[in-house]
Amino acid sequence: MPKSCIFKVIMGGASGSGKTTFLRGTFFPSFNNDDEINQIGVSFKLIDCLVDNEDSYLLQVWDLKTSSIFKHLYPSFCSGAKGSLLCFDVTNRNSFTELRYWIEIVRRMAGKIPIILLATKTDLVEYSVTDEEIQDLIEEYRLDGIFFTSINDEKHDEIFKQLIKKMKNLSSISSFSMLFPAYDCKFDKFMKFFSVCPICERKNHYNYLKRFYFSKDNNYFKLKENLLKLLERSNDFEDLYYNKIKIGIPCCRCYDKLFKSNIY
């Protein structure tokens, strides 16, 4: 049975450590503007992921703003988090030193949740932190790994795949993709056209259709492409066809009735 999960994730790190740049990276279509961010001390990014072609994970990333006037809010912001990404700039030793503060805040308020380090600006030559120091910190706090990133190599897929594995205690993930339905014009048309079950005429679940549309499974992909072609061709159907043909995707209940009950 496909799962739909929502996880709160804390994004922390010193000022200038690259955390907001990571979330604003070219991989992501958009992000909150600065006026919204600085009013409350935190900004939010929703990251939608599809795991193993069927399970949907919505990550609510809380990017904590590094300002002394907001520090008293950090404990409240961390409460209820299921995972954390903590950034430091490899060329700025102070940002590495501050990681202890961030780790202790997260652990105190959210418990022993997975924490993954993001080492940013690794494309620059002058490192201020050694590999041994980084490894010692990971072992001391029993952290859940580290990714070395740069503006040209942000590794978003790998990072969020690893975070979900740790939060769900999964041994492996066979397929993983990050979804941006709001920026896919075909998806919008697809949702409008197939939003209603052609049999019972109930509304199809959004997540049900989204999983199908973005699945990397080859069979689903071929079926989706055929449905999109049919959608385009239906624009030229004469009224006569609309009285005789129903085109659509059955809802979960109708699918079970039609197919699962007929398995011999």
Image (cartoon, rainbow, N blue to C red):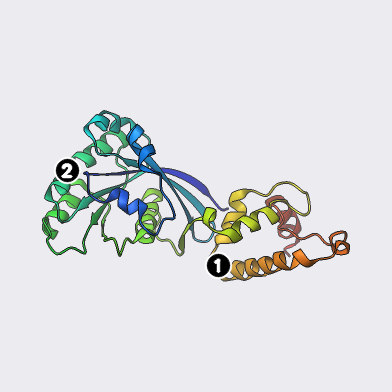
**Residue 23 image offset from top left, x and y in percent:** 35, 51
* Vertical comparison of 160 with 202: above or below: below
Among the 4 quarters of the image, the one containing residue 131: bottom left
Q: Is residue 243 left or right of residue 180?
A: right
Crowding around mark 2 (Cα neighbors within 10 Å: few <14, some 14 to 19, many 20+) is some
Q: Is residue 15 above or below residue 232?
A: above
Point 34% across, 37% down: residue: 42
Amino acid type, residue under disc 2 in the picture:
Glu
Q: Amino acid at mark 1?
A: Asp
Position of residue 95 measured from the top left corner of the image (x, y, whole percent): 17, 47
Q: Is residue 183 left or right of residue 150?
A: right
Q: What label does residue 217 carry, if any? A: 1
Residue name at image x 36 percent, y 58 percent:
156
User: For this view, does 103 lie left or right of residue 132?
Assistant: right
Of mark 2 and mark 1, the one earlier in the sequence is 2
Q: Quadrant of the C terminus?
A: bottom right
SS under mark 1:
loop
Q: Position of residue 114 (x, y in %)?
A: 31, 47
- Circle 2 sits on which residue? 98
Residue at horizontal 73 percent and vertical 60 percent from the top: 259
